[in-house]
Amino acid sequence: MCYLACVLAAGTLSGFPTIEPILVNNEIFAELCYDRALPLGCEDQMKQLGTLYTISLGCSVSAMFIAGLFYDKMGPKNIAIFGAIGAACGFVMIWASLLRFELHWMIYIALPLTDTMGFFNSFALMGFLWHYPRYQGTIMGISNSSYQISAIMSLVVVAMTESGLAFSSVCLIFAGLCLVSAALSFSAPSLYEFHTEAKKMLGAPIVYEPVHLSLKSSLLVMAKKPLENAMFLAYCLTNYIAVVYYVSQYDLMTTVMFDDETSAMLANIFAVVYVILGCALSPFLGRLMDFTGFKMFLVLLQISTIAFVSTMFIRNVVVNLIAVGLAIIYLSAFMTFVAKWAVIYAPAELLGTYFGIMFGLIGLLQLIFNSFVVPAIVDKYWPEPVLPLSAFYWIDGVLFAAGIVSGVSLSVRLLPSLASFLDRLALSVSLLYCRGQVKLRDIFLSFSLSLALARSLSLSLSLSLS
C-alpha cells in the first residue's frame, strides 16, 4: 500500500520531454508565438518551456534539503500525506493554468510544486529502514523506483490524451489519484515508530532537536569523518554531473557520431529503455548492495563507471547501447547509494537532514554546471553551430577522470586491503608501458596514472589528518 501511495503521487518532471509536446499543443506560452504571427512550437515558446523545466528542476533539487528536515521532524507518515496533498494542489494549478492565457504564470508554481511534493511523498518507504535492517538497500531502491516511475506516468498522460481525453481532465484525474495516495500514506510508519525501531537495532538513544539545530548537528556529524565525506562528495559530484550531462546531451551526441536514421533510432530506444530499465533496476541494485555490502558495491560501481567511459564514444550501435545501459545503471544506483551513506554515518534522528544536505548539494552543483558552466565553456571553445564530438569528449572526459581518481581514493580509504592490490596493478602497468609491452598505450597509461594518483592522494590525506 505504501509503495502504491508513492507511485500515485510521483509527479511528471522526470518525463518532461514526453509531456512537453502536450504543453505546446495546449498553448502554454503560445502567446509568444501568436504575438509574432508564428505557429505553435516557435523558438520563443520552446525557450520558455525550457526555462520552466530548468526552474522546476532547480526547485526540486533545492527542496531535497527541506524534505530531509521535514522527514526528521514530521516522520514518514506525515511527510507522505503532506507530499500527496501538495502534489494534488500542483495538478489542480496546472489545470487552472490551462484555462486562460493570463493564468499561464501559475504553471511556474504548479510544475515545481507537483514534482517536489512527489519527492516528499516518496520518503514514506524510508520509514521501514529499521523494520528490515538487512534489506535497507532494497527498501531504498524501491523508494527510488517509486519516484523514478514519474517518467512512466508521463507516458500514461500521453496515452490518455491520444485517446481523446483533454489534458485539463487528465490533470484533474491525477489530482484525484494524489488524494488517493494521501489516504494510502496512512500505512507508512509514524515518526515514533521509526525511532522506536531504530533504537531497538542501534541500541542508542534518540536525541530530539529543534529544526534550527538539525543542520548544525548534521554538519558536526560530517566533521567527524571529514576525509571520507569529502571523498564521497567528490566521487558522487564528478560522476553524477558527467552521467547527467551525457544523458541530457545524448540526442546531440548521436547525431554527431551516427547518420540521421541511426541517431533517430538510438534516440527512440534510449527514451524507452531509460524509462523502463531505470524503474526496474533500482530495487535490484539495492538488493545487490545488501548482498555485497556498501564497500564492495562501491567497487562494483567504479568498475561499471570505467566500463561506461570506455564505451561511450565508440561509433558502434551495439556498444553505444551498452554505454546507455551502464549510464542507466549508475543513475538508478545513485540515490540509493547516497541514502545508504547517510544511514551508515548519520544517527537515526538526523537521517533525513544528512541525506538532504548530501543530495541537495550534489544536485544543486549539477544544475549550476549544466545550466551555466557548460554553456560558457562551449561558447568559448566551440562556438560553431554544431558541437564536434571532441567537445563532449573533453567535458565528460575531465569529469570522469576526476571521478575515477576520487572513487578509487574512497575505495582505498574504506577497503585498506585494496590498497596493496592497486599499488601492484599500477606499478605493473607502468612497467609494461615503459618496456613497450603494452599496445593500447593511452588507455593503460591513463588508467595506471589514475590508480597511482588515487593511491598517493589517499595516503597523503590520511597521513596529514592522522
Image (cartoon, rainbow, N blue to C red):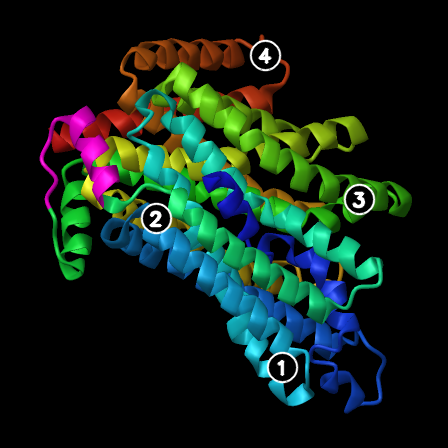
Q: Is residue 326 above or below residue 145?
A: above
Where residue 28 appears, x then y in whole percent? 70, 77
Depth check, mark 4 against mark 2: the one in front is 2
Q: Type of residue at label 4?
A: Val
User: Which callout, 1 or 3, points to the residue nearer the camera?
Assistant: 1
Per the image, the residue denoted by label 3 is 268
Crowd tier of the residue under label 2, counting other residues whose Cα lies within 10 Å: few below 14, some 14–19, many 20 or above: many
Question: Could you tell me what secondary structure mostly forms the magenta stretch?
Answer: helix
Residue segment shown in magenta: 192-207
Q: Which residue is mark 1?
A: 104
**Residue, disc 2:** 77
Q: Which residue is mark 4?
A: 438
- Residue toward you, 305 or 336: 336
Which secondary structure, mark 3? helix
Labels 2, 1: front one:
2
Depth check: give the residue in front, 302 or 98: 98
User: Which badge, 4 or 2, comes first in the chain's sequence?
Assistant: 2
Q: Could you say where residue 351 lies in the image, as x and y percent from the top left? A: 26, 42
How many residues crowd mark 4 within 10 Å: few (<14), some (14–19), many (20+)?
Answer: some
Q: CA distance from mark 4 to mark 3?
A: 39 Å
Residue type at mark 1: give it.
Answer: His
Residue type for callout 2 = Lys
Q: CA distance from mark 4 to mark 1?
A: 62 Å
Q: Sequence-wise, which precedes: disc 2 or disc 1?
A: 2
Q: Considering only order in the chain, which callout, 3 or 4, is on the residue closer to the N terminus?
A: 3
Disc on the earlier residue, 4 or 1: 1
Q: Is residue 29 magenta?
A: no
Disc 2 to disc 3, how far (Cα)? 39 Å
